[in-house]
């Protein structure tokens, strides 16, 4: 009995020690390569300075939104801070999987949440009609979707429309994102371009309200484009572009800028364009999930990420664009070496009507006017997945069919040759036996 009580006491002590440690531990779950390492390392010292408390950071990464969501929704993992994309944030809000960020605990003079561009705040609010979304999430990075293209093979005027996907001269020359929401949300704008022009439907309505008819129209466009699609990719397309191995790639703006910079070092000239029918504007944001333990440190961490200096460091490290819109960030974005100017008042406010900015990062107002926020598919998820399966698998392009036919033919020919050789060898063996 003494041994039993000793073991019980030891177990309780260990649990208490773990709980105490956990109370001073911040578990962050983020995309890979999506934060400046120095910004992360400096947080504990900053937190100590702000609160007088110690904190250790456990930093883990995920590759896709859905795997992160499953860990929390099914596994009840106790991450304190996560960084999902907008459609996952929307889904988690609907499912009650997010906690409110405790902004009020932070003194007003140390509160940096208001550094987020009102443009981003307004877009985030489109995720819910019942909740104040800013209570649950603060934006991190954002961008658009468009075409990266090799100027050696493709003229910019050829890509003014998403209809370029159907142009026969691009047969087998296009890489597409293997991301059904992203592809749907831009192709639906092309499929309904006439209705948009007549004012019968808005871009926001088309992207937010999925219907079987709209899904079918997008499927028809993608199937018609199948001969032009060289492959479906999530990450390797940008690298293929830098090597000059393909002509164009449907891409996210951050990946596009990375590819442009990398390609320039190899003597390959790439550019980026958002077609005239419009595009999606996507966001990633910081949230505190339902099963978080250290919500105090989590709230301070999200606040810390809104400091302009940290936003600039993160942008320079990962190559994407922060939602922070302070004068410091505007000064960073304004580059006199860029001749063309952009109207960025939608993002930075008055005084930003003619900024010498990289428009892959900061699109002109005229482009943003044609962009809609991507949403969770909700009840239409299965129908979307079925559509995507048909587009990718059941409808092979002519080039893919030809490759398959050639491979099968080669296998058949090889088998015939092998059979003929074996028969010849057996005939020769019979002749040798007869001679004996």
Image (spheres, helix red, strand yellow):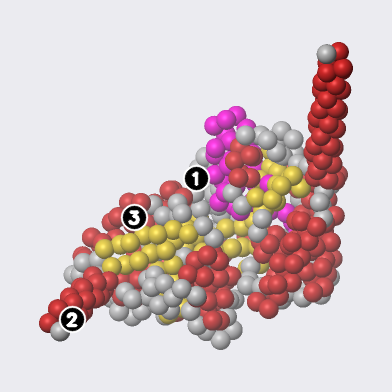
- The answer to whether the residues at label 2 and label 1 have Cβ atoms under 8 Å apart is no
| Quarter in which the N terminus is drawn | bottom left
2 or 1: tag closer to the N-terminus: 2
Looking at the image, which is closer to me, 184 or 319?
Answer: 184
Q: Residue at x 35, y 66 (%)?
A: 27
Q: Classify 355 as above or below 212.
A: above
Q: CA distance from mark 3 to mark 1?
A: 24 Å
Q: Which mark is residue 4?
A: 2
The magenta segment is 249-277
Residue carrying label 3: 39
Q: CA distance from mark 2 to mark 1?
A: 71 Å
Residue at 55 percent across and 70 percent down: it is: 88
Which mark is nearer the camera, 3 or 2?
2
In x, y percent, where is residue 297?
Answer: 30, 71
Badge 3 marks a residue whose secondary structure is helix
Look at the image and say whether residue 221 sits in the magenta stretch.
Answer: no
Q: Is residue 86 left or right of residue 82?
A: right
- Do the CB atoms of the residues marked 3 and 2 lie less than 8 Å apart? no
- Residue 6, quarter of the rendered image: bottom left
Label 1: which residue?
335
Which of the two marks, 2 or 1, is nearer to us in this view? 2
**Residue 245: x percent and y percent?**
68, 35
Q: Is residue 87 above or below residue 146?
A: below
Mark 1 falls on what kind of element? loop
Nearer to us in this view, 38 or 322 = 38
């Amino acid at each position: 009995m003494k041994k039993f009580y000793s073991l019980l006491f030891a177990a309780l002590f260990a649990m208490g020690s773990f709980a105490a440690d956990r109370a001073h531990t911040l578990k962050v779950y983020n995309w890979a390569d999506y934060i400046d390492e120095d910004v992360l390392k400096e947080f504990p010292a900053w937190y100590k300075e702000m609160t007088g408390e110690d904190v250790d950071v456990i930093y883990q990464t995920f590759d896709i939104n859905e795997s992160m969501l499953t860990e929390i929704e099914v596994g009840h993992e106790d991450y304190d801070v996560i960084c999902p994309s907008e459609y996952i944030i929307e889904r988690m809000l609907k499912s009650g999987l997010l906690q409110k960020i405790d902004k009020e605990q932070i003194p007003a003079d140390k509160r940096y949440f208001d550094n987020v561009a009102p443009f981003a705040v307004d877009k985030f609010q489109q995720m819910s009609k019942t909740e104040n979304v800013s209570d649950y999430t603060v934006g991190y990075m954002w961008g658009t979707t468009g075409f990266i293209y090799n100027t050696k093979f493709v003229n910019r005027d050829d890509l003014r429309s998403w209809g370029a996907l159907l142009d026969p001269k691009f047969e087998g020359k296009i890489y597409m994102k293997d991301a059904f929401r992203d592809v749907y949300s831009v192709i639906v704008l092309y499929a309904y371009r006439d209705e948009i022009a007549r004012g019968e439907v808005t871009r926001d309505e088309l992207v937010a309200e999925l219907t079987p008819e709209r899904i079918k129209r997008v499927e028809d466009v993608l199937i018609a484009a199948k001969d032009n699609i060289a492959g479906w990719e999530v990450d390797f397309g940008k690298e293929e572009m830098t090597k000059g191995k393909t002509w164009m790639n449907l891409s996210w703006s951050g990946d596009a800028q990375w590819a442009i910079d990398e390609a320039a070092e190899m003597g390959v000239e790439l550019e980026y364009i958002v077609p005239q029918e419009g595009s999606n504007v996507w966001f990633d944001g910081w949230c505190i999930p339902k099963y978080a333990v250290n919500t105090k440190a989590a709230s301070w961490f999200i606040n810390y990420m809104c400091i302009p200096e940290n936003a600039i460091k993160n942008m320079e490290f990962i190559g994407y664009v922060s939602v922070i819109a302070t004068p410091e960030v505007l000064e960073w974005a304004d580059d006199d070496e860029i001749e063309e100017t952009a109207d960025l008042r939608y993002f930075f406010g008055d005084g930003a009507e003619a900024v010498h900015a990289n428009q892959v990062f900061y699109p002109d107002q005229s482009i943003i006017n044609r962009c809609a926020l991507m949403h969770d598919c909700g009840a239409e998820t299965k129908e979307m997945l079925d559509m995507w399966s048909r587009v990718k698998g059941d409808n092979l392009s002519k080039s893919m069919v030809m490759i398959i036919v050639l491979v099968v033919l080669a296998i058949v020919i090889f088998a015939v040759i092998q059979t003929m050789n074996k028969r010849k060898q057996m005939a020769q063996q019979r002749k040798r036996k007869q001679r004996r």
